[in-house]
Every structure is written in structure tokens, then in C-alpha cells.
Image (tube, helix red, strand yellow):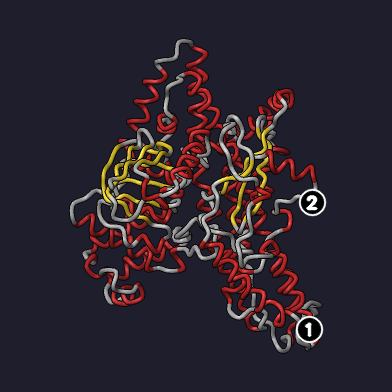
Amino acid sequence: MADQKFPNPHEIATIPGTEGWERMYPYHYQFTTKDKEREDYENNMFWFNDGLHYPEPMYPFDIIWDEAWFLALSQFNTRIFMIPPALGVDHRIINGNVYISPVPVTDPEEVQKRIPLFMERAGYYYENWDTLHEQWEKKMKGVISDLEALKFPSLPEMEDISVVKNGLGTSSGYELLTNYDKLINLGILCWQYHFEFLNLSYAAYVTFVDFCTKAFPDIPLQKISQMVAGIDVMLYKPDEELKKLAKLAIELGIDSQIGDDTKDVEIVISELEGSEKGKKWISAWDGAKYPWFYISTGTGWYHHDASWNDNLNIPLSSVRIYIEKLNSGKNIDRPLEAVRAERERLVKEYRALLTTDQDRQTFDQLRDTSEMVVPFAENHMFYVENWFHSVFWNKMREVAVIMAEHHFIEETEDVWFLNRSEIKEALWDLVTAWASGTKGYGPLHWPEEIQWRKGVYKIFKENRPVPAVGTPPEVISEPFTIVLWGITNESMAAWAKLKEIGDPDKVNEIEGFAGSPGVVEGIARVCRSVEDIGELKEGEILVAPTTSPSWAPVFQKIRGVITDVGGIMCHAAIVCREYGMPAVVGTGHATAIIKSGMKIKVNGDTGRIYIER
């Protein structure tokens, strides 16, 4: 990688019109030249844009989740499980976009010291996985229950007499302050639990990958991932509920009443209430809402990623897709048996290549552990990024309503342009003004500041971030960077190659990760958000920055998937393998090069995409 050049992080120019943007985000996210030691460190590290989680710039409030995993992932790697070759992941922001840099353990002696510690600590979790995971689920449900119980009523002109007669001793203003603290603390706690098992899931899988690549030097990463495919995970449950609702509608003979996408969900439900069969379907529909409709329409990392429960027309539209498929004689179920049969075939084939009992025993142990832990890599996403986040965003909107009532912001959606610390400070201003019967300073400060920030954010969105800055290592070997984000020496070289070409209209071939096997040709459809999904036509190939679990129903329409970001264990790659659909992930720039309507060929065996021009 010595000839691979990326910009110096301290030399990235501020975009005209955004001067002063740094105050929107935590101060420690800034690259700096104020300290020589920190400057040298930043120059010598390799920072890549985390487009897997953040396909657009960060709103000041939404960065709370980045702060949360900055702490959580790093602590479990570095201080709790003592993962031998990896410390934490460092974070910075450039022009509103998050850049991250995995921090390796560079001293071979330190790696050796950490191995027995990791074996003891991680070993305890692997040996007691089911029991500890059951305990984890109870903790997560408890956090969500506590979140749902939080209330943010408007501040009264006068406290109810019960405050006096019950000797409460506190005010509604105090409750607002403490409940906001609880809201934020529950968010951070949720993300503590998020990483309790996640790093161990990836570590087990990466260990299996490491064994296989050494034992079978020519094995594609995709073949290794197929050896733990055919998993049954919670993240598929929302989609399965929609399939059940479609089948029930046909069984009850009310499928025609579900109608087409021109009929709003409220009208459909109102009409179905007129018959017993309709009421039976509505009962099943209502039963699926909690918790399965708390599935985000995006990554779940942004406040605007609405859940199905926020817009019930979205899941209803998917039910209609399934009804149409079923009525045309199509099978809408995942090809689970075929995927599992291929898994067993590959396991048997590669196991037979091993020449010693010890190697076969190691292979069996590592594969079995991977199969046990890999489902968590998907399951946690339902609890955290989907269920918890969906409730959290709406609780935060309750806080925003109060801020708007007191003219600290002009409308509730303006709250996202303040970071969590600024909101706490503003609430103190608001509450003390309410308590003293005076006017707070916030209305004189925040609306004007928010208008400026909106302008800055608009410019950020119009800017395409550089894929990486800093100094690439000679060899990218950090396991999570490879399997989750898809950052390798090859992908870096591919990005640089595209940069050299310059004009995306001259690119005829794109390289990425072979995410899911198979070869398919078809018409491309570029979808950057859930709003674009409705434009997908039967038989097209989905091209997206990344995919969301809530997009699962469109897999009944499409023939293949291409993403800008992600490695062999990203969500898009996992889901495509489960659906038996070709996928190429981690292309870097596919959405910038491919246009809707282009005829393309996707080779999920080699990771190559060919564009007809």
C-alpha cells in the first residue's frame, strides 16, 4: 500500500459556507494540529468514512449513537475481553461525516500476553453462551420497557394540588430534567449491551475465517460464510409476519379488500372491520405490530428512519406484494432448505481436504462455535437499531414538543440540530425561566443558530466525502474492518483506480466483495432510501449505499443486490445468502457510477460488476 495515497486529514479544506461547523459536534471528534503528538498519530493512522452506518452526514443529535459505540465497542475489545490483536476504534468527523480508524495492538509481545486473558474471558462467554444470551435478552427488554415508560408532559401553569397534598417535594420542571437524563442514559446503556456479545460473535467467525484461509489458501471468503448460512434469526421475523398476514388474507378470502397502494391503511382497516373475517385479519395485524413493526425503514441510526409503526402504509404495501406473488403461484418463503443443503455440502467438501484428526477437530469446533454465535450478529440489530431506536426517536420528539412550546425551537424536527449536551443546557434554561416566571435566553439564541446549522447541513449533503484519509497500512489485517466494513488492500486499490479514471461515465467495470454467489443480468435500479424502494420493478437489480432489514419484501422482486459499503458479514451480504440471491458489496462508488435503467451484470462469485454502455 506504500504507493496508495489518501489526503492528509489536516489538509481537507472547509467547504465554503460551512465555516465553524465544528461546534455542531463533540469537540474531541476534530482532527487537530494543536498538539504534535496527536497530529502525528492522526497522520499515521488510516481513517475511512463509515458509510456502512452513516450513508449521509450526521445531524448534531444523531451522533449520540456514534458516541455510544465509540465507547462500547472499544471497551469490550480493550478493557473487558482483551481481544489480542485489536484495541478500540477511534473516531473523527470531517465536514459532517464520520471517519473511523481501528487501533491495532502493534507490539507482538503484548498480543501474546493478551491471548490467555482473552481465552479465559471470552471462553467463559462461549461456554455459557445460551444462558448469558437469555440474560442479555431480559436486560434488553428491561431497557426498552424503561424507555417506553418515560413521560414528557408539558410544563403546567400551576402544579396540581396533589404535589402539595402528597408532599412530593419536586416539580414538573425537575421531572423534565431528570427524565431527559434518563432518556440519554438508557440510550447509552442500550449500546453498552449492544456490544456485550457482538465483538465475540465476530471474533469467533473471524477465527474460523483465519483457520480456513490458512488451511485452504484458495478458498473465497464467500464459501466460508456459506458454511454458517441457513440461520434463523430475529431480524427476519418482521418480514415473516408480513408473509403470514398475506397468506391469512388469501385464506380468509379478503385479499382483494387489502387493495392496491392507492388505498390508505386507515381506509383498509375501516372497511375490514365490517366483517368477521376482516376483524380476524385485523387482530393478526395488530398482534404483529408489537414488537415486529418496530423495524426501521433505514439503518435506524438517523432520526428520520421511521419504523413501520410510524407509517403503517409501508408494511401494508409489502403485504400486498406478497399477496400478488402468492396469487400468481409464486413461493414467497426463503429457500432455507437449499441454503442449508449447500452449507452441509461445503462443510463436508472442505472438511475432507484436511489431513489430520487435529485439524478436523479444530475445524469442527470453530465452525460449530461460529454457527452458534453468528445469529447474534443479526439479532442484536432488531433489539437496538430497530426496536429501541424507533421508540427512542419518538420519546425525543416529546422533549422537542416542550422546547417548541417555549419557543426554544421553531418546530419539533429542529431539535436534531442540537447535540445532546446542548439540549440539556437548553432545558435548564427553559426550566429555570418557567420556574421563575421569566423569559429564557434560548428563544433568542437557538432558532437563529439552528437556521445556520440547517444551511451547513444542506451543503454537507451536497458534498461527496472522500472515502479515506491518512496513511494506509502496508497490509490491512484487522478482522472486523475486513468482514464488516469490507476495507481491504484490494478495495482501497479499487477506490483509487476509480479516482484516477475521474469520469464515472467512463467506468465499465466495478469491483467489490463477492457477497453472495450467483451471476445475474438485468436492469439497475438505484435506491438511496426507503422512498426510492417503491420505484423498483420486477426483475431489476437493486443498487444502494447499504440495505435495511425492512427492505426484505423487495427481495421478492429483485434479481440481485449491489452496495457501496460493507464486507462479507454486512447485513446485505448475509440476507442475500439467505435468499439465495447474487450480491456484490463494498464497491465504494456503485451508486455514483450506475444509473437507474442501465443494463448490468452482477457476478456474485467473483465480486465484479459489468456495465453495458
How many numbered tags mark residues here? 2
Determine the residue positioned at 61% across, 81% down.
410
Classify residue 593 as left or right of residue 38: left
Classify residue 120 as left or right of residue 270: right
Seen in the picture, residue 164 relative to 364 is either above or below; the reply is below
Q: Residue 31 carries which label?
A: none
- Mark 2 → mark 1, Cα distance in angstroms: 42 Å
Seen in the picture, residue 610 relative to 30 is either above or below; the reply is above
Q: What element carries label 2?
A: loop
x and y, in percent, of residue 423 in the image: 70, 70
Q: Is mark 1 on a helix, strand or loop?
A: helix
Please identify the quadrant where the N terminus is shown: top right
x and y, in percent, of residue 514 in the image: 40, 36
Q: In which quarter of the image is residue 436?
A: bottom right
* The one of 415 and 56 positioned closer to us in this rendering: 56
Q: Quadrant of residue 222?
A: top left
Q: Earlier in the sequence, mark 2 or mark 1?
A: 2
Classify residue 469 as left or right of residue 117: left
x and y, in percent, of residue 87 in the image: 68, 37
Q: Identify residue type, mark 1.
A: Ala
Determine the residue positioned at 23% across, 55% down.
325
> Is there CB contact under 8 Å for labels 2 and 1?
no
Q: Does the rendering let one see residue 206?
A: yes
Q: Does the rendering let one see residue 586?
A: no
Q: Quadrant of residue 337?
A: top left
* The one of 184 and 613 positioned closer to us in this rendering: 613
Q: Identify residue type, mark 2.
A: Lys
Q: Which mark is residue 34?
A: 2
Between label 2 and label 1, give the one nearer the viewer.
2
Q: Which mark is residue 435?
A: 1
Which residue occupies the extreme top position in the image?
A: 356
